Image: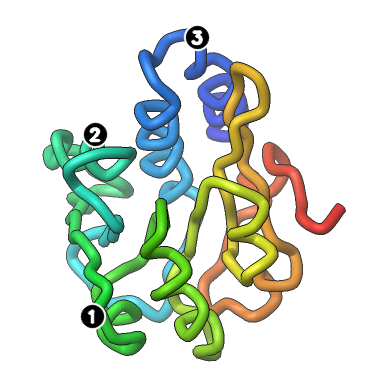
Amino acid sequence: MRVVCLAALMCSLSAQAGTPDQVRSALLFQIAKFIDFTHVQSDSVRYCFTSLSKGPGAFLAQQQNLLIRGQPIAITELSKSSQNDELSRQCDITYFDGKIENDILSPWIKTRPLTTFTVGSNFEFLEQGGVAALIQEGKKIRLYINREQLEQVSFKVQARLMTVSKFYPN
């Protein structure tokens, strides 16, 4: 049932939402329902964004009352000075957008095992070692998952999410 709901959401959100950032925000929320963060003993699902004034972070930050598996969401804004171990402790899902992604992502992805589901917005993000990307293709936004990085993470991505995803590299 969840797969059907997620697939319908991924296919229809572009028509309902006003902007690609609103669609990405909704997808980031839905994606968390299909990831088991076994390493985390937290009372919330923790999202980190490079900006809360624009992009998907701005939209999700306005929805602080949302729950994922009975847990509230927590939103944090990253800065260039964030340290790798700090990010791993603060973030379950991190969305990288813009110039800051290169400054933070490169050293962060070298940390093993990866404890954070990292999401970007382009193929370059996946090439640099991101776990996933929400890529706009025409009027739709598709979830791509980096197979190589997925093998090195400490969390479990449920098969139901994998069935509605595309893989990189193909």
Q: Residues within 10 Å of mark 1 (few under 14, many from 20)?
A: few
Q: Which mark is residue 52?
A: none
Residue bearing mark 1: 81
Q: Earlier in the sequence, mark 2 or mark 1?
A: 2
| Relative to 152, residue 25 above or below | above
| SS type, badge 2 | helix
Q: Nearer the viewer, mark 3 or mark 1?
A: 1
Mark closer to the chain start, 3 or 1: 3
Mark pair 3, 2: CA separation? 17 Å
Q: Position of residue 89 (x, y in %)?
A: 27, 81
Name the residue tied to disc 3: 15
Please report the residue visible at 18 percent of the width from the left and 50 percent of the height from the top.
72
Amino acid marked by disc 3: Ala
Of the pair 83 and 157, the residue shown nearer to us:
83
Q: Is residue 66 above or below residue 83?
A: above
Please, what is the three-letter code of the amino acid marked with disc 1? Ser
Q: Circle 3 sits in a helix, a strand or a loop, which is it?
A: helix
Left/right placement of residue 168 relative to residue 159 reads: right
Tell me the quadrant of the picture where the N terminus can be found.
top right
User: Percent from the top left, x then y, of residue 137?
Assistant: 67, 27
Q: Nearer the viewer, residue 97 or 93?
A: 97
- Considering only vertical position in the picture, is 140 above or below 29? above
User: Residue 162 location in percent, x, y?
Assistant: 69, 48
Tell me the quarter of the picture where residue 24 sits: top left
Quarter of the figure with residue 50? bottom left
Which kind of residue does numbered mark 2 sit on? Phe
* Residue under label 2: 59
Residue at image coords 66%, 20%: 138
Do the residues under discs 2 and 1 have CB atoms within 8 angstroms? no
